[in-house]
Image (cartoon, grey):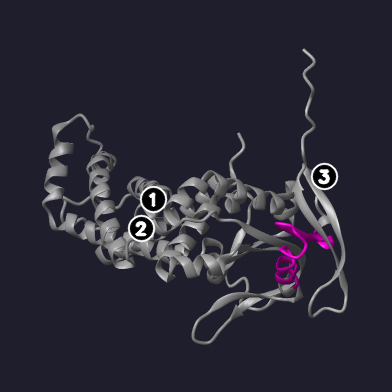
Amino acid sequence: MKISPKAKRNISRIIPFAIIWLLIGWIIDITVYDVTRNQNFNPDTDISYTIPVLIFASLANIVVGTIVGFLEVVYLEKRFSNRTLSAKFFYKLLIYLTLIIIIIALFYPVAFTLDTGISLLEVDAWQQLDRFLISISFLTTLFHLSVKLSVCLIYSAISENLGHNVFLNFFSGKYHQPIIEKRIFMFLDMKSSTTIAETLGHVQYFKLLGTYYNIMSDPIINSFGEVYQYIGDEIVISWKPDKGINQANCIKCFFDIRNHLNEQRGALFNEFGFEIGFKAGIHFGEVTIGEIGALKKEIVFTGDVLNTTARIQSLCKELKSDLLISGAIKELLPHSNYQYSSKGEIELKGRNKKEELFSVTLEKKPTIANNM
């Protein structure tokens, strides 16, 4: 069974939640073990730290962390997208704590049976749960859970705002020292954006941009692209060469975005009064990638390829094409159902060297005549 790019992305975002729960769980367990010297001072409510219990606690942390991650990434992140950061944090914390209290009610008797050997079917196992839920130990457990949840929600907020890959790159220090890499870039720009902005006004236009970029999300994810920057009504998408070239993903992304916008054309027109279109340029080359900034850190790409891609995109109107690509990227692309029409060698502004550009359209499928 083939996993979709979106599912892979979700899995990579969920895994850190499980790791956070496991690591914090180990820190708490080791600290408690060290302080108490493994003496159970509250046998009526607490469970002793035995090897089976610790293994079970580790597995439970992984399971609960995965559940929290799944709910956060797949459901709650979108549901609370319009809330402020503090409101998101508060409401999600309440939801997760409620869910986890239910999980405790289910898992605690199991841990108790591992500690004592008493069967789950015996009344003592459930009476122990009742005593635990009204004890100081339960409040301590809630505090531990709140710490784990808080760390997870902070991670989620940072990851959502920076971007998952950017956050991991910051955390791993991958680009702490500048690195030269080859990248594919697409500069995608909304058509007639100045007219639309003047007609709608600042607030409504900002709302349009939010909807516009949301529509693009799935096509970008499904083509293995990464958003480098939002610059007003322009978005810059990048691919590592193997991801962008495979099955012409960088080209596919453009047409998938167009299809998604066409599907929402009626709704967009009803809400904003405009039919939204866009144009794009794609190029390939070397960039230097690294962390930069004193007051605010960013991972920045620099290189001639970025300037060249922007200039290719700016020629779309003049060359009457919605999608222009450079010869550098065309020669790398596999045979696919796209037609490439040469626009000749063009001298791009600010460059001495001419670049052959190609217009890209979907290949028209031949029609089969029906003689019946």
Q: In which quarter of the image is residue 117?
A: top left
Q: Earlier in the sequence, mark 3 or mark 1?
A: 1
The residue tagged 1 is: 58
Q: Is residue 165 magenta?
A: no
State which mark lies toward you, 2 or 3.
3
Q: Quadrant of the C terminus?
A: top right
The residue tagged 3 is: 335
Residue 87 in the image, given as x and y percentages of width and height: 28, 63
Which disc, if any, is residue 258?
none
Secondary-structure class at tag 2: helix
Amino acid type, mark 3: His
Amino acid type, mark 1: Ser
Q: Quadrant of residue 352?
A: bottom right
Q: Which residue: 34% across, 49% down?
A: 57
The residue tagged 2 is: 25
Residues at badges 1 and 2 in contact (C-beta under 8 Å)? yes
Q: Which of marks 2 and 3 is nearer the N terminus?
A: 2
Closer to the camera, 36 or 14? 14
Residues at badges 2 and 3 in contact (C-beta under 8 Å)? no
Closer to the camera, 197 or 335? 197
Q: In this view, does 151 lie above or below 2?
A: below
Would residue 67 appear left or right of 38 to someone viewing this image? right
In the image, the segment drawn in magenta is 308-329
Per the model, the C-alpha gap separating discs 3 and 1 is 49 Å
